[in-house]
Image: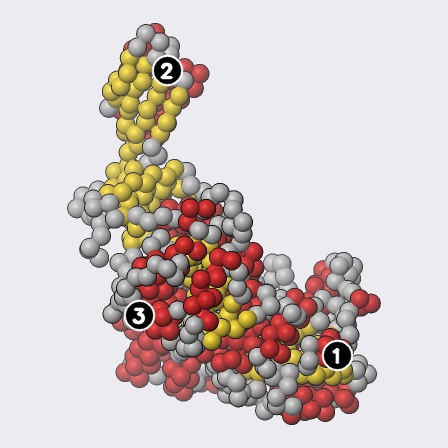
Amino acid sequence: MKMKRIVSILIENKPGALARVVGLFHQRGYNIESLNVAPVFDGSYSRMTVATHVSENDVEQITKQINKIIDVIKVADLSAGANHEHEFMLIKFNKLNLATKIQKILKSLNCAILEKSKSVMVMSAYGPSGDIEIAIKTIGKSNLLECVRSGSLGLHEGEKKLTIGDK
Amino acid sequence: MRALKDEGVKFLFGYPGGAALHIYDAIFRQKAVEHILVRHEQGATHAADGYSRATGKAGVVLVTSGPGATNAITGLATAYMDSIPLVVISGQVQSHLIGTDSFQETDMIGISRPIVKHSFVVQEAKDIPKIIQEAFYIATTGRPGPVVIDIPKDKTDPSKLYEYKRLKKVSLRSYQPRVFPHPGQIKKASKMLLSAERPVIYAGGGVILGDAHKELIALNKILKIPVTNTLMGLGAYPAKDKHFMGMLGMHGTYQANMAMHNADVILAIGARFDDRITNTPSKFSPNAKIIHIDVDPASISKIINAHIPIVGQVKESVDALIKEVKRSKIKMDAEALDSWNAQIFDWRLKHGLNHDLYQQKPKSKQILPQTVVQELYHATNGNAYVTSDVGQHQMFVAQYYHFNKPRRWINSGGLGTMGFGLPAAMGVKFAFPRQEVVCVTGEGSIQMCIQELSTCLQYNLPIKIININNEALGMVRQWQDMNYGGRHSASTYADSLPDFVKLAESYGHVGIRVTKQAQLRPALDKALSLKDRLVFVDVYVDPNEHVYPMLVAPNGSMEDMWISKNTKA
């Protein structure tokens, strides 16, 4: 059965490394729903979170293929177990009369006001991707000037971790 | 150059150009590594590839930027598909010109990304020795494959010198290929194998790449069960052995395909269940339990689900399996095995490989292509290194030249690259100058890298080229005959073929034309007797001959085969 999967990847922070992962998804015929990447800890490597909509067999094949990329240090399919999945979003709108309504919608999502002027308002919000999606729908596309999302970020639940140095 | 020498490189196949000139000057001023000048960069990659397949060492290529690099792409893809270790060094424009669309600039790393195991860009000249060391390490370990090193011209500037440092041992935190198999899995595999009633060993190119043929033979000395090899695995198990069923798959033997379909346990070793083997995956061997040994975990359960996956080097894994089988108290059911072997023997008798052809002189007045290969097999006592191109002739060699040793059969199995045969034969000949090296080709394929006849003259490479000339793209035409109502769209060109004898002569070689059966063996014997000359034997064969058996596609299983033009088994 196809469902959303969260794959976390630790990858050497080297030029071209990201392209290898992205290229692999295309090459093997898998879709990337969202992708997030940034260096962590000492900066010698990055942590990527890829969200993809695939079957269980496919996600096994994806993680194996990603693991074959020489620059990839570790891979984990977070959706194989319990996990935390969150996404960060920024929105900009100019219908200031909607501000209270939007704030209400975003309330469950940990929101903050970043900018408030006479003409525009910029807010940030974070929470599970599903909730972010619903929030955007509820606010209505036509009420937003701009919207940017980080894509899914994920961690294992509990003591399980994905770091270098442990096997 | 010193880094290459330290890797034990003997030959460098290449073609010079602007961005590689600093390196070429360094080549001129040393003697340890011999540079072989090809006539097209595709030839360089195939030659290095052939060298690697025959020796087990990495093949090394040097090309310039831009067109030099792009011409090497087909050879890279060929090596990648068959997991052949290559190190391809490409010159690049100077660092400050990258991204400016400068002369002979192309993004080699980007273009080659999906068809390499890994690639490096040299950022600092002082890193070159380390990168070369890592490149060889990555190319030759785990599941082997080609590695590209892109070097901007300013990084090889001879006026800037650096201290040469060599690592004692390469170690990468992101790359640690597994060597030893999981002992628990080996135990399970041994139990399943020994309890089988209709077992089959299905061994692929991984057995050859992993130098595990001796272990495979030793394992089957104990098990005594039927063995089949893939196209890439031919030679991994001796063809003369009574347990050998021949090749399996699209043009595999009747008995090998039937045995796979009806098996209860399949031991897959260094093989990857590709579509030319399984036919329709959902119909693949319905009752078989699969044990799959492979160094690449991604090859396991990719197409066909493995009941017992074993990740590890093939050599170490088969060795562990041998020990476990010896230790085990389970005895194989001898009665069941006997009747299984009898069944396979029966299949072999029923539809052996064009059985009649094997036994009798052909009735047709024209030479049959299969006969050419059979005669070559006898004329060379089955001992030659045989390279091939792609098409009907390739399948005829796989079926009728019986390989008893690994690394003797050299062909482009995965990518199916026409033009591979001649340059690959050059690479083999450089590796083994005293061995017989034969390139069996077709008039279509040979024209894709014919320019290398010039390289053969320059380096005096006495290769024997056997051109199975049916005046058509035979395999294309076979499919058109079978699936497209015999409409030969763009597959024939009989009136525009060159005179291959004159062509060979114009390159300074010997050409022989064969049109009659009676001329065939004498021509082959003569070619083989000319020890110091390249001989091009152009054999005109029956253009209507097809390759059989052939799996019925699409939607067929492994027991659905065409046995001849009008018979389905």
The disc numbered 2 marks a residue on which chain? Answer: A
Q: Secondary structure at mark 2?
A: strand
Q: Which residue is mark 1?
A: B501
The answer to whether residue B399 is above or below residue B77 is below
- The quadrant in which residue A158 appears is top left
Mark 3 secondary-structure assignment: loop
Give the distance between the C-alpha atoms of the residues marked 1 and 3, in whole angstroms: 50 Å
Labelled pair 3, 2 in contact (Cβ < 8 Å)? no
Residue in the foreground of this view, choosing between B330 and A13: A13
| Marker disc for residue A93 | 2
Q: Are marks 3 and 2 on the same chain?
A: no
Q: Which one is closest to the eye, mark 1 or mark 2?
A: 1
Which chain is disc 3 placed on?
B
Residue B246, percent from left and from top: 55, 79
Instruction: Say if B19 sits above or below B474 in the image.
Output: above
Quarter placement of the N terminus of chain B: bottom left
Q: Residue at x 29, y 66 (%)?
A: B164
Q: Give the residue type at disc 2.
A: Phe
Toward which corner of the image does residue B334 lie, by quadrant? Answer: bottom left
In the image, B209: left or right of A99?
A: right
Q: Check the image and tell me how it is coloured.
A: secondary structure
Of B321 and B38, the residue lying toward us? B38
Q: Secondary structure at mark 1?
A: helix
**Location of mark 3 (residue):** B179
Label 1: how many residues lie within 10 Å, few (<14), some (14-19) or many (20+)?
A: some
